[in-house]
Image: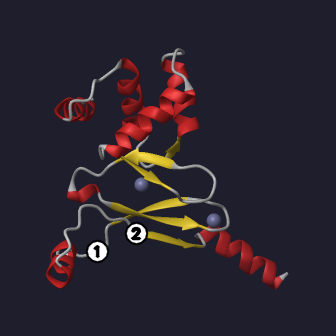
Amino acid sequence: MSEIISLVNELERKNIKVTQQRRIILGILNNNKGEHLSARDIYTLGKDIDDSIGLSTVYRTLNLLRDVGIIAEYHFDKEFAKYELSCQKEQDIHHHLICKNCGKIIEVENYLPGHFKDEIYDKNQFICQEFSLKVSGLCKECQQLFSEEKTS
Ligand SMILES: [Zn+2]
Ligand SMILES: [Zn+2]
């Protein structure tokens, strides 16, 4: 609950009106951490809370929240963009392993060393504001599937 308050405060700081629908969408993202929801998923969940929410409102809100950096948009596959709250704290930063076979998304901790940004800056004079690492491959279950296929 306190996290939703800090998200709302952040919107206000950025001079963005916190409408009931924006609050609902933020709440859904906050309650589904690690889930990587599509606009349609958010719409379906939002409808249960307030049935006046429309899909186009969801899209507009997501674009707005993305543009101000409150949420992150991912394109894990060609299908739909997926969303989650941006990592506000250093310890929340994580990366995604995407299984090319079943589409599963596995979150992994940030293995990059803490001085990663400093090093980028030292070598390239580039200020790193956000970064993400996308790793695609085969999950454990799918590896098993493929090895069984080979042996039978
Ligand atoms: Zn994630
Ligand atoms: Zn898989």
Q: Report crowding for label 1: few under 14, some 14 to 19, many 20 or more residues within 10 A (C-alpha).
A: few
Could you say where residue 113 lies in the image, as x and y percent from the top left?
Answer: 23, 76
Horizontally, residue 76 falls left or right of residue 22, namely right
Horizontally, residue 84 falls left or right of residue 100, namely left
At label 1, which amino acid type do we have?
Leu
Asked if residue 31 shows in the view, the reply is: yes
- Disc 1 marks which residue? 112
Q: CA distance from mark 1 to mark 2?
A: 10 Å
Residue 146 circle label: none
Q: Report crowding for label 2: few under 14, some 14 to 19, many 20 or more residues within 10 A (C-alpha).
A: few
At label 2, which amino acid type do we have?
Leu
Colouring chosen for the image of the structure: secondary structure
Question: Which residue is rendered at x = 22% and y = 76% of the image?
Answer: 116
Could you say where residue 15 lies in the image, as x and y percent from the top left?
Answer: 21, 30
- Disc 2 marks which residue? 133
Q: From the viewer's perspective, is the residue at label 1 or at label 2 nearer?
A: 2
